[in-house]
Image (spheres, rainbow, N blue to C red):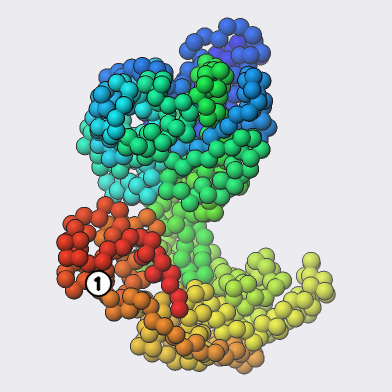
Amino acid sequence: MEMTIEDEIQALRVQLKEHNFRYYTLDHPMISDADYDVLLRRLDALEHDLGEDIPEDSPTQTVGSPISQAFTASEHAIPLLSLANAFDAEQVKAFDQRIADALDDDTYDYIVEPKIDGLAVNLRYESGILVSAGTRGDGRVGENVTDNVRTITDIPWRLMGENMPKVLEVRGEIYMSKASFQALNQSQILLGEKLFANPRNAAAGSLRQLDASITARRQLSFFAYGVGMGADGWVTSQTELFERLHGIGFPVQDYQCFSNIDDVLDYYEAFQNKRSQLAYDIDGLVFKLNDYSLQDEVGFVARSPRWAIAHKFPAEEALTTVEQVIWQVGRTGVITPVAVMKPVFVGGVMVSRATLHNVQELQRKDVREGDSVWIRRAGDVIPEIVCIVDDEAHPTRLPVAIPDVCPECSTPVVQEEGEAAIRCSGGLACPAQLKERLNHFVSRQGMDIDGLGEKLIERMVDEGLIHDVASLYALDFSMLATWTGMGQKKINNLQQAIAASQSPDLAHFLYAVGIRHVGQATARSLAECLGSWEHVRDANEEVLLNIDDIGIEVATSIQSFFKEQHTIDVLQRLYELDVHPQACEIKQKSQDHPLVGKRVVLTGSFEHIKRSDAQQQLRDLGAKPSGSVSKNTDIVIAGEKAGSKRDKAEALGVTIVGEAALLAWLSFHD
Ligand code: IVH
């Protein structure tokens, strides 16, 4: 039987109400924002097509969801509305046109603010004192979360300044920074608790706790962006509101004003690149008419103002399904679980694979074939599976089996003590490892051999033409000529490219041979300090440790590389086949790092680097990191939430610097 338009409307309303409940009340959504928007738009279009009165409780007319029974009600003096969304420039222009049509005067300014991805709250101040705080709820009545809100340090209990309205409702967004979100999920892992899909859900879940001491531990933040009751006569524009809000003690975001919609759209385009640099998630920009009297003139529709619109960014998170978990063997034999997923558009690109890093990570996340998963791709970062959607079917699926033999060569898998990774013990007898090693060897940063792609390497190994990297210089090109797709021109080019790589730059060569822990930067340091590959091969530990950015782990790895029989054989063969890395001019150290010999103490947490990593890097630079502050300490580097050590340093008059100085020192090169 065919579905009537009424049936479809009914079905969509039921579906959307359920999604609202999962999102707003349970903090565990089952669909992505983008998919939700598609359903909502479809319902909106059908309701218009049908042309009948739309009931007040239709999801197109309401915001949020009725409040949970667990909380008492908190009524907003003036309703908290939502924003209409625009997904492209055309929709923004249409919005601007509606504004132009509604206003007599055609000069007006837009204010542009980032759209924070958190949850809206209404803070009620009476005579400057915080008396209640409510979530948005259904827009009219929210959940009373006053005690929880009092634990958020960004939110003042008492407002500063004079001439304040007797009752002032401040509106804004409670959010969790990216760093706090990462830290929270790490601790959820340790406690064996469920992971949060994104900072927004984590913020919502943390605020809506019956025990406010849990909220207090969760590091929530706040930005103010609006005012309900009390606005009249207090401020006349959004820019003025921001100044006032800031003046009475609220954090506010940066904003920009424009008098023309094309400039607004240019700003939006440019802002997309800044998105990943912010310390917190945003999901778009909000464009508002700046002048409040013009806002009044333009007015409202059911659930949102007509004077504002949210121009969304492409979603950085998406829901998809894991079809299979496969095991990939890398260059060093590490076997990595990789999820093959139903392709999905996220962070602006199509994604169908995500690494699960290692067995431990796979088991922690408990990803099983058939599970729905949240994936995330922010900025240029590789996509990752954040967590599974814990639905009823998950327990009925089998956990992914951990291989006990290599999926490529069937030799037993080994796991070294203290290592999360499992490895193939087949060494270069494993074709997968050999292929990866060859790909690395010929790569642009390595020997830079053009025309030798993955497919060709695969075939060469499979057909027994190549046994190690040296075989490349003894290739039987007449054999290649018999392969389909290998014309004479291609073969000539390949032959030339291989010949051209016979006297590589030393740093490239050292990178190409694939020494564990030696990336491009370390390869360059080795080349510039030691000058020839024989010197690198013969360098003892003391010599190696004297080189910038080489610590004990790297030094050990270099030494054991050159002791391996396979390495000795291959280097010998390369030499005989006329592969001779060029000598490199030795660079003298011109100036020591400013921290050499300095006693430094790191305290607090840093946004861009783990404290333990910073400590190691400082040690490598020649500084002397220590755990406690004394009068002999030269410098204290204090991050977020630095406590008693910072106080002690202050009392002793020791120099204190922040994370920016730390990062500058770590990237200092003479
Ligand atoms: S103004 C009446 N400004 O986005 C209009 N909202 O999708 C009130 N949001 O409910 C909203 N950043 O929770 C406004 N700079 C900003 C915002 C912002 C985030 C949230 C807010 C709102 C939702 C609408």
In the image, what residue occupies the spot 27% across and 19% down?
72
- Residue 268 image-quadrant placement: top right
Residue 115 placement (x, y as % from top left): 49, 36
Q: Residue furthest top?
A: 53
Would you say residue 195 is visible in this rendering? yes
In the image, what residue occupies the spot 67% across and 65% down?
455
Q: Quadrant of the N terminus?
A: top right
Residue 438 placement (x, y as % from top left): 60, 73
Q: Nearer the viewer, residue 544 or 296?
A: 296
- Residue 450 image-quadrant placement: bottom right
- Residue 635 image-quadrant placement: bottom left
- 567 vs 48, left or right, is left
Residue 5 placement (x, y as % from top left): 63, 13
- 132 vs 270, left or right, is left
Tag 1: amino acid: Asp
The residue labelled by disc 1 is 634
In the image, what residue occupies the spot 37% across and 64% down?
661
- 323 vs 117, left or right, is right
User: Mark 1, residues whose alpha carbon is within 10 Å: few (<14), some, or many (≥20)?
Assistant: some
Q: Secondary structure at mark 1?
A: loop
Would you say residue 118 is visible in this rendering? no
Above or below, 11 relative to 344: above
Q: Nearer the viewer, residue 493 or 133?
A: 133
In the image, what residue occupies the spot 61% across and 6% down?
52
Q: Nearer the viewer, residue 183 or 287?
A: 287
Q: Residue furthest right?
A: 488
Q: Quadrant of the C terminus?
A: bottom left
Residue 425 placement (x, y as % from top left): 44, 71
